[in-house]
Image (cartoon, helix red, strand yellow):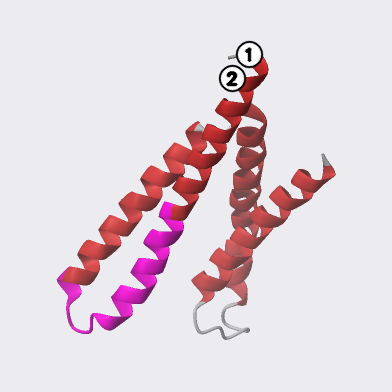
Amino acid sequence: MTDAQIGTAWTRRRTLHRRVIAGGMMAAGLGYGLVVPRLHGQDGAVAALTVCFLVAVAIGGLMSWRQRDEVERREATIAFGASGFSLLFLFPALRLSHAVVLLQDPMLVLWLACISIGLAVWTIRRFRS
């Protein structure tokens, strides 16, 4: 094999691994979302499935993190930092405005806002470079 063939084979294998990991995590999420609502009154089964789902996502996330290069890891770290930094300002603002703005689930709003900010930072940096 030539160097070009080795590089192409390595790239194909890396892409396949990424797709398998992403597919496994999506399958775990889909399975969890389809099975858990049907388990009425079976709290033990729901708890066990939740733990299994969280373990699958953690393992998939670590495997995915290992396959990224230093540039992708840096971009992800910056996006995680933006999410955490936004939490520093949004949490006190939400707690102070909770009496005025009645939200049914303020922590969900906070979580979605922080995740959205991190995703926006990642997307902007991804397409800018």
Q: In the rendered structure, does residue 34 fall within the stretch colored magenta?
A: yes
The one of 25 and 53 positioned closer to us in this rendering? 25
Can residue 69 be seen at all in this image of the molecule? no
27 on left or right of 12: left
- In this view, 88 is above or below 34: above
Q: Amino acid at mark 2?
A: Ile
Q: Which quarter shows the C terminus?
A: top right
Q: Are marks 2 and 1 in contact (CB under 8 Å)?
A: yes
Name the spot of residue 76 as percent of width and height, x first: 62, 41
SS under mark 1: loop
Segment colored magenta: 24-44
Query: Disc number at residue 2?
Result: 1
Name the spot of residue 98 as percent of width and height, x first: 57, 78
Can residue 53 be seen at all in this image of the molecule? yes
SS under mark 2: helix
The residue at 29%/63% (across/down) is 50
